[in-house]
Amino acid sequence: MSTPVIDLSPIVRSINRLSDNLQVVNNNVAVVDSKVEVVAQQQVITVERIDELYNEFAQFVAADIKHKQLQLAATRIIEVRQEIERKFGHYSEVRRITTGILQATDAAIVRQDTMRTATENLMLLAPGYWLAPALVALAAWIADNRLLAEKSLGEAIRRDDSKASLFFALVCRRGQRLEANAQWLRRYFQIQNPHSMDREVVVMLDALANGVFGGAALTACSDVVDQWLGELEEQAGFSDEQRRRWAGALDILAPKMRDNEYPTLPNHTSAWPRLQTALCRARRNQVVHSFFEQMFSGETTVPPSLEASVDALLDSLVKNFDEEELPLRREERLLQLTVEEQGDRDGAKRRFDEESDSLEEQTNFAAMLTNSAMNPQQFGATRATQRYAVSLSRDWILNAHKDLIARDRAEVPAHAELACGSWKGSSSDGRNESELSADLNSRYESRIEEAVNAVSLSPGDWIALIGGGLLGLVVLVSGAILIGLVITGIAAAYFYWQYRTLDKRRVDVREALERERDQALQILLACLAELADLRRELAREDAKSNEVTSFLESLTAAQFILSGPDKQRATLAS
Amino acid sequence: MSRKIIGAPKVEASRARAAQSRSSGQVGLREPFLGKRLREKRSNSYLEAISKIDAGTYQSNRAALDALLQAISSEFPELGIGQAPLGVVSRCFLGSPFEVHICDFTGEIIEHFETCRLMSPPFESARSLALQPAYAFIEVYTDAIRAIAADGSVSVIGKEGDQNP
């Protein structure tokens, strides 16, 4: 009996074909895998680009808002100025004629009838305006018409006692009527309340600081200023308020930081806003020092004659202090600041709030000093007045400056928390570079080891192997040998393929994390270098606070009163 | 570990000072004189007394501590209850790990603190300023802190010197 020969060659061929096909599948899966990896990388890139786009969009929106605010402010400021011109333009004529009358009288080339007609016309043109009857009185005085002069004076005083008194004090000083000048000044002082003063007191300060008032009037003014300040200082909380006012005025001088001065640090430490604020505030010392130094350096312009000095003061008195215009002047100022701040409405509002006192109808005398020193353009205050106001306020400024410095120093963050990649650490001044670098390397090393070790055959791979093998065995036992072998072969091939790619996946993971570590290290080194620079700059700028203190301590008030222009000599502040 | 030099138990001298203060019926200064007084430059003897805290003589010598507290209380003889400083915080030169120390006038305690250990609430707010070399020490009040420079000049943070009204 011959032994039956089982021809397994078809099965072997089938298995070989199956093996070839599996190899093809394997290759295809590898291709798919690489494509998935590419897609994953592209996704990361896409997310980064979306973040960039979001940031750029946010910047664009902010810039667009600023641009629109700037355009709006530029347009509106023209409208406001037109409105001022429309509502109060007729006052200009009245104002211009003031010094015109005085100069015409000096030159003696205008008939008194002409002056009288002109001033009486102004009474009709500007109803309710204090200056019109004052000018009628002036013309009547020049024409020696006592009855008309007294009548019109009464009307001017009724309309605005304070301004009219100061006006005639200056006019009398111009005419060398010293007794009358002193009487008008006494009247002016009597109606003043240092807690609530009209803005035109700055003109009195101007006259005092520029040496227009001499002799008894100068002494009277100086005494009354001291008396006002003494009275104010006795009020509880006044000195604190005054220090706060000066602190606010100095604080807004802090410059803004330019873009990209510190390119890396801002994105990698949560302490950046506080560090930035600390540096800007420290840089303020230089600005404050320059501000006061410029104010006190150089010569002040002394008008060639007493007449010219008084004319300038009269011009300022009649132009700058009319309360009716204040609401529009306030709006104009805010719009002007918005334009200066390139559309940054918040920045403009902050600056406006600090100087808003200067556009209030009434405020206390010490606030007037602050405003004269810090916002002279709002009053038309001269450089000499600025110096005088600063000298009178010296102690408040010094205390405000010292308090601000203490606040700034207390708020400098002692440490900066750094985040570079997945690493986090902390540095105070960037000097612990080697320690932090070693820590970063060590933590990344641990992370790499963990990630590489985590790359292994998944439970799914084992289930596929065992499940496929068991299923193939069951099918094999049930008689479908070929199908059973095929199923077992597929399971084994899948498992083998997964096993073979393990090393490559581990290498990929290691390389990706090593790249991340290198980038994180570069960022850390850049952060530490910038932090060290920032701390050095902070210390340098902070030290400049002593220069401000020394400068202010050297000031005294008396030396900043100029001698009068009629004495043909100017004692200049030094 | 902190170094508590003298603990909370009161001694006769401190009781005597407190009694003296009460019996004199001192109501203190009212504003604006209080603010002005606390703005005045501190005396050399006061500055010197505070600077001796690091010398360590107080650890074993109760009489030395009483002398220190006496020097401090005589700096503000006219102040009433609640107007004087609660204590001072200054840099500690005992070396690592100590960073700052408190001289608590009310509890009559001198205590040194390490870098990572927080002081009690009213004093902790003075730590960052105390570490600034520009200031000799920081006085802590119920409503403000006052930084005292080496020349005795005063800077205020808090209620009076609030720069952000």
Image: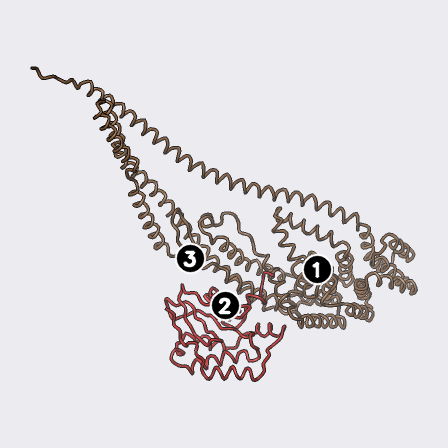
Chain colours: A brown, B red
Residue beneath disc 3 = A429
Residue at left offset 8%, top offset 15%: A2
- Note whether A53 is above or below A239 in the view shown: above
* Residue A15 in sight from this viewpoint: no
Badge 2 element: helix
For numbered disc 3, what is the local secondary structure? loop
Give the foreground label among 2 and 1.
Answer: 2
The residue mark sitting in front, 3 or 2, is 2
Amino acid type at mark 1? Ala
Q: Nearer the viewer, mark 1 or mark 3?
A: 3
- The residue sitting at 62% across, 67% down in the picture is A240
Residue of label 2: B122
| Image spot of residue B58 (x, y percent) | 41, 78
Q: Residue at x 69, y 60 (%)?
A: A382
Q: Relative to A165, is A4 on the left or the right?
A: left
Q: Chain of mark 1?
A: A
Are dots 2 and 1 on a single chain?
A: no
**Quadrant location of the N terminus of chain A in the rendered image:** top left
Counting from the top left corner in percent of width and height, residue A268 is at 44, 49
Residue A215 in the image, given as x and y percentages of width and height: 75, 72
Task: In the rendered structure, find residue A381 and report the number of the disc placed on it.
Answer: 1
Query: Residue pushed farthest front?
Result: A478
Name which residue type carries label 3.
Answer: Asp
Q: Amino acid at mark 2?
A: Pro
**Gap in angstroms between the C-alphas marked 3 and 2:** 27 Å
- Which chain is home to disc 3? A
Nearest the eye: A281 or A463: A463
- Measure the alpha-carbon separation of dots 1 and 3: 46 Å
Q: Residues within 10 Å of mark 1 (few under 14, many from 20)?
A: many
**What separation in Å lies between label 2 and label 1 (alpha carbons)?**
45 Å
